[in-house]
Amino acid sequence: MTSAQIEIQLIASLVAMACAIPGTFLVLRKMAMISDAISHSILPGIVVGFFLTEDLNSPWLILLAALTGLITVFLVEFIQKTGLVKEDTAIGLVFPALFSIGVILIAKNANDVHLDIDAVLLGELAFAPFDRLLLNGADLGPKSLWVIGAILVLTVALLFTFFKELKLSTFDKGLATSLGFSPVIMHYSLMGVASVTTVGAFDAVGAILVVALMIAPAAMAYLLTNDLKKMLLLSVIFGVVSAITGYWIAHWLDASIAGSMTSVLGILFLLVYLFAPSKGLISVLYRQKRQKVEVHLLTFLLHLQNHEEESERHVKHLNEHINWREVRSKSVLDLASKNNMIVIEDQIISLTPKGKEFTSEAIKYIMTNKSSAIEEMKDRFFLFRG
Amino acid sequence: MVAVIFFASCKSDEKKDGSSKLKVVTTTTMLTDLVERIGGDSIQVQGLMGSGVDPHLYKASEGDVSKLFNADIVFYMGLHLEGKLVEVFEKMEKGNANTVAVGEVLPKDELIGSEYFASNYDPHVWFNIGFWKQIATHTMEELQKADPSNASFFEENTQKYIAELEALELQLKETIETLPKEQRILVTAHDAFNYFGAAFGFEVVGLQGLSTATEAGVQDVQELAKFIISREVKAIFVESSVPKRTIEALQASVKSKGHEVTIGGTLYSDALGNKGTVEGTYIGMFQYNVETIVNALR
């Protein structure tokens, strides 16, 4: 590995961490797209900066870009607070407006200058190692490493200092207010961090990767855990792992680095989405299927309890009377006998004492409309689930 | 001879550190061709951009990092041709890397400037053969500085190349002489041919602005269509690194006004043709462009 390769991976990992932290809160607050919005709405800031300095490389352009990012956040918040539109609608209203102000400013005043977001914010990870920070001739490493490092330190410091406040204001605004700290201030600080991170990371790695690194790792973590601390940790890990894996895939394919990293994030998300233990698609489908069989089981047990006469309890009768297909009636019968709820003698089915107890308790819960308690009851009675 | 040099010098980075050859990285295909002609097989040349790549919109790949990182010297056009890559090279120069913006050596008062912002110039300077000769000489000097042991070899190659360029210029002028003066109007998709027009007496009209990122508006298309009809232009041209769509829209617009204009062919503007073909060299590209233009307009 050359030093350039190590530096790229280091920068990418730091960006992944710096994005994952605000990203987690944004995903929880359903404001994930704010980073995408910021990456567009900073255009007027850049254009105004260019008109003031007439220099495409001035740091003022980036400062004004970050400022426009904050304005975006304020406007989104303002529109959203009116309660007339939802969060994502507010985002969708604000950033095209700001972006088009930038486009019109360019079209009117600087049509033949190569002035766009890409030209000012470098946004290409491959070239990050070549932009060095020199101090008195000494090479201190890539500039973006320092910028992103500083943003990350700031983010982590804020996270540790205000973790409790952030947590409360994210999950329970009312309680946060009554405990004496303002969720509004927390919200703006968080959005401010997101804005600065977006602009800073934009310069280092480019827009698409920033948006992907803010949202995808947090979304994956969200599917895997309900614990905020674990979620933060997981999204940082997912971000860093995707960044490094993506880099090596780019190396292997000789392809765009940001593109490969974003693809890895997409693939990882798909895997988590499918296979996450409790919120994943497959486990949700599996649980739905189990639920269905268990509802059938309960119906079947109720039927048995209501009918003393043997003709109603004949195995053959099930198909006609309850009108189940043979396969299902067999799986229900199997489940019931595996759990020792029924016994079958000469094709006649009877409830065991355990089966009776289960059925009457279930009826009680259904009558009192406490269906949720049935799940808990199932855990007590079932040796095998459906 | 040229082909041999190509294949000898464009092998990939297999012998990266083993060989003592000077490692040179170039941006556009024109510069790659130029440096290969001057350096021959005494240097190792790696071009970042392939044929058909618009230098403004070039996206870096992971392999470019090690190419740039291991390069002894980097040649690029400058004058904002390579978009934000120019900024990267300028930053590399501030570190200890050796990067050369060959376009910057040209006298600024001879360059075609932007209407609004004086410091921005039209970067398509290679369409002026005189400029290309200056660039060749400058490139040779930089190579000599970087690898003094091969100085005379570079000198020899450069002189041979400049002689070929002079022959090319004469030959092209002869070809163009066969086209009546009033028919020398070049309509293309983007303003890459201003220097060509100035050097060979063509009136150049582009549909897009200088940057390939800006799109042509409906009004631009309409006005250009009127111009084509009033001046009885026979053919308009597509460029290899710009999508065909805009120039086809122009053709349709002329047709809707009841006139005919053919698409005269594809011209090479920001990039040469594929490696190994005749259009894959600067000289071949220039001959091809001029023949295409003259044949279509005659």
Image: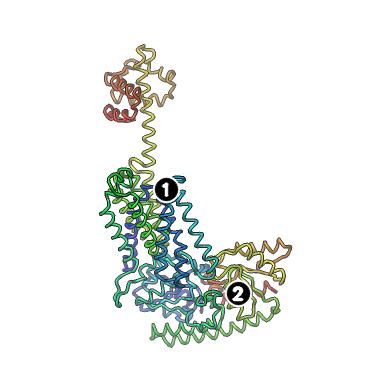
Q: Are marks 2 and 1 on the same chain?
A: no
Residue identifier under label 2: B288
The C terminus of chain A, quarter of image: top left
Q: How is the image coloured?
A: rainbow
The N terminus of chain A, quarter of image: bottom left
Residue identifier under label 1: A81
Picture coordinates of residue B122 (x, y %)? 54, 75
Q: Amino acid at mark 2?
A: Tyr
The disc label shown at residue B72, or none: none
Q: Quadrant of residue A140?
A: bottom left
Total numbered labels placed on residues in the image = 2
Q: Amino acid at mark 1?
A: Lys
Picture coordinates of residue A165 (x, y %)? 28, 49
Between residue A41 and residue A275, name the one nearer to us: A41
Q: Secondary structure at mark 1?
A: helix
**Chain under label 2?**
B
